Image (cartoon, coloured by chain):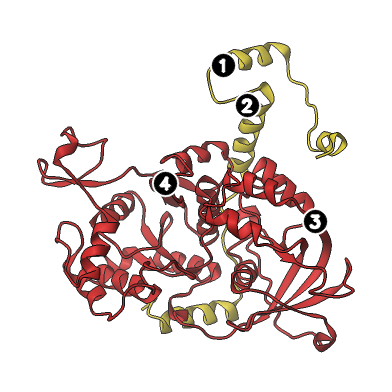
Chain colours: A red, B yellow
Amino acid sequence: MPKPHGGKLINRDLKQEPSDLSALPKFKINTNISEDILNISNGIFSPLEGFLCNNDLENVLTEKRLANDTPWTIPILLDFNKQDIKEIQEGDSILLINEENGVKAVLDIAEIYSYNKKTLAQSIYGTQDTNHPGVVNINNMKQLLLGGKISALESKPRNFDEYNLSPKETRFLFKEKGWKEVVAFQTRNPPHIGHEYVQKTALTFVDGIFINPIIGKKKIGDFKDEVILASYKSLMNHYYLKERSVMSILRTSMKYAGPREAIHHAIMRKNFGCTHFIVGRDHAGVGNFYKPYDAHDIFSEFPDLGIIPIFFRSFSRCTKCNSVVNDKICPHDQKYHINFSGKKIRELLRNGKIPPEDMMRKEVSETILKFDKPFVE
Amino acid sequence: MSAEKEDKKFTTISIPTPLAEKIKKRIKGTGFTSLSSYVTYVLREVISGIEEESEEVFSKEDEEKVKERLRALGYLD
């Protein structure tokens, strides 16, 4: 099993509430930031122990590494306006609160600093174009940043907690199952046949597969979280070996940072104990901001990442081969190839129709159609 | 970033000149833009390979808690 990223699995859960908690200034945070806090506290973001300070941020932007040279590509930041928290200074502690999921955490402020939004957007997303959702998010950020270690105190029980394993738990689970090599698959959609082929091709060479859907804020028209989970459960029950496959969720927001985010996704799965990570075409991309295989190429910059990427190109069905193929294994012309179009599958399901079985397993389609409203409205 | 700060991020090491010449020839036409970028890449690879595989250490109490939750959720029999 790989070492956690940076060498140590971070645990920033406070078992006992500090006695002076009520005296701390309170600061309301949004749900995305509260998810970051939970991911720091249970080690998903190891080796981070809190929000980035300026030297780490600068290094992440210019070198794609923390100041100590550990690979890190997506900055984890806490923004605020001066008027939000009055009279705070470096060395103080504040209480961070999110009302939606009940997250409470103490931040020990190591640094209060300013930043440049254009530099941040250009470095992370490679663009300042406001058609990029990540750029819009940066433009909406507040004027200053707070860096420092956090200690998580509590959070409310939430939907899908029964599928929410921490890195400590997955590492234990993989060990109990006797898996030495584990491949992680990240997803945001119910599985079609192309996904199944990618997963099973990768699984052929390792001991187990860790299917890790991202759960959280979605766009209108996306499948709802409960639909994604139910459809995977159905696929796994019918077509996967129980002793070779595990599904658990990951609560984090998509940044659509393409190549940089592919590295971030790989790091999180390394912390879960995975040795391999599947990277598909246009991983974490949006629109035409990245080239289809930018997220493959970036891995060559990180000989010290500590998790092996498995690169896949697009799978399609070849009517001549009568099987699922990709451009490396099929000699036939494109005219014989039918792509697994997520858009087409969604359209059929939206009209209450079952997609063809060579596109999506019948059990999966039926599971999706059992939901009155499978899509985010 | 200031020049002073930039200076602090890098240090100089000495390698034999013939080796440096060999490397310069080798990296022509590759993605490496300089001798330094090649040496940095190789050293990062070597150092990360040296790191040992980890064995998670759980206390007995911790192990029981984790096992119990995984069983309750159906992840373990």
Between marks 4 and 1, how big is the CA–CA gap? 31 Å
Labelled pair 2, 3 in contact (Cβ < 8 Å): no
Between marks 2 and 3, how big is the CA–CA gap? 34 Å
Kind of residue indicated by mark 4: Asp
Closer to viewer: mark 1 or mark 3 = 3
Residue pointed to by mark 2? B38
State which chain disc 2 sits on: B
Labelled pair 3, 4 in contact (Cβ < 8 Å): no
Horizontal placement of B15 versus A239: left or right?
right
Closer to viewer: mark 4 or mark 1 = 4
- Callouts 1 and 3 on one subunit: no
Residue B41 percent coordinates (x, y): 62, 32
Kind of residue indicated by mark 3: Ser
Of the numbered discs in the image, which one, if any, rests on residue A114? Answer: 3
State which chain disc 1 sits on: B
Labelled pair 1, 2 in contact (Cβ < 8 Å): yes
Residue A309 percent coordinates (x, y): 45, 45
Residue pointed to by mark 1? B26
- Callouts 4 and 1 on one subunit: no
Between marks 3 and 4, how big is the CA–CA gap? 32 Å
Kind of residue indicated by mark 2: Tyr
Local SS, label 3: strand
Residue pointed to by mark 4? A282
Local SS, label 1: helix
Closer to viewer: mark 4 or mark 2 = 4
Between marks 4 and 2, how big is the CA–CA gap? 27 Å
Q: Give neighbour class at mark 1: few <14, some 14-19, many 20+ (Cα, 10 Å).
A: few
